[in-house]
Image (cartoon, rainbow, N blue to C red):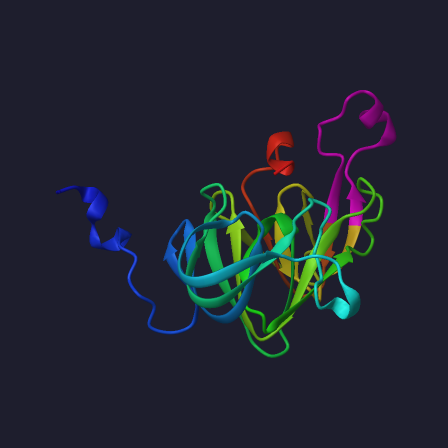
């Protein structure tokens, strides 16, 4: 059987080392040797002896279920084998954490990560007014985190002299050391008359960077 479908770049080859690698721009391959974590429903294929378990609530954080404002829940993958992860054909990127690194990421953009990374769900400081609060996942430690983004992300440097204002529906993540707050870009009178649809943004100040996707969350996408 002959086809461009079977081109070498599409072929899944055996892993040479444990951990995650990009299978292609739209998917991540994880060679599991013990345990890893991923968003529920993101596994598209696997081979080997692997067990998938929903992360439930438990005592002492042993069975911690991570739920953000978007309703993201995690699953653990245990055993020996390989698994592939993707989400709605989004572009995938792997972030390699070194000691001292900290990254705040929107839960809807988390795909999978090493168990050596620590994570906690936190309300974004200064953003408690947006729909009951804006919750993001804070990742620290050492290891790799795979994130997924609709379209090609925009990386914007943030400096003390130039704070950045981002749409809360478009932001993917930012340097955890940045200060956050809400910025209202419309007057109350303008909002009453209908306004521009861009009334409130997240203000990021300090030294670091912010990652933005080139689209806003639609009502249907937010429900996934």
Quadrant location of the N terminus? Answer: top left
| Residue sitting at x 71%, y 68% | 62
**Residue 189 lies in what quarter of the image?**
top right
Quadrant location of the C terminus? Answer: top right
Residue 44 image point, x, y percent: 44, 48
| Residue sitting at x 76%, y 25% | 195
**Residue 197 lies in what quarter of the image?**
top right
| Residue sitting at x 41%, y 49% | 26
43 or 215, nearer to the observer? 43
Residue 69 image point, x, y percent: 73, 46
Indicate yes or no whether the magenta region holds residue 35: no
What's the magenta region?
A: 182-202
Indicate yes or no whether the magenta region holds residue 199: yes
Residue 21 image point, x, y percent: 41, 64
161 or 207, nearer to the observer? 207
The answer to whether residue 199 is left or right of residue 157 is: right
The answer to whether residue 71 is left or right of residue 7 is: right
């Amino acid at each position: 059987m002959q086809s461009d479908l079977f081109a070498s770049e599409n072929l899944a080859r055996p892993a040479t080392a444990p951990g995650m690698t990009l299978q292609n721009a739209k998917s991540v391959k994880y060679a599991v040797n013990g345990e890893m974590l991923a968003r529920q429903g993101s596994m598209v294929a696997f081979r080997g002896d692997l067990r998938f378990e929903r992360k439930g609530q438990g005592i002492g954080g042993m069975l911690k279920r991570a739920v953000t404002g978007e309703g993201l829940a995690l699953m653990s993958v245990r055993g020996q084998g390989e698994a592939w992860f993707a989400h709605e054909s989004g572009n995938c990127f792997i972030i390699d954490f070194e000691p001292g690194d900290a990254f705040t990421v929107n839960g809807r953009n988390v795909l999978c990560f090493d168990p050596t990374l620590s994570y906690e769900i936190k309300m974004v400081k200064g953003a408690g007014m947006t729909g009951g609060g804006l919750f993001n996942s804070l990742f620290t430690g050492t290891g790799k985190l795979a994130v997924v983004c609709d379209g090609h992300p925009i990386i914007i440097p943030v400096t003390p002299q130039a704070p950045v204002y981002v749409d809360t529906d478009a932001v993917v993540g930012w340097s955890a050391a940045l200060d956050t707050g809400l910025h209202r870009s419309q007057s109350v009178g303008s909002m009453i008359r209908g306004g521009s649809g861009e009334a409130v943004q997240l203000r990021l100040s300090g030294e670091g960077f912010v990652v933005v996707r080139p689209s806003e969350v639609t009502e249907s996408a937010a429900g996934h």
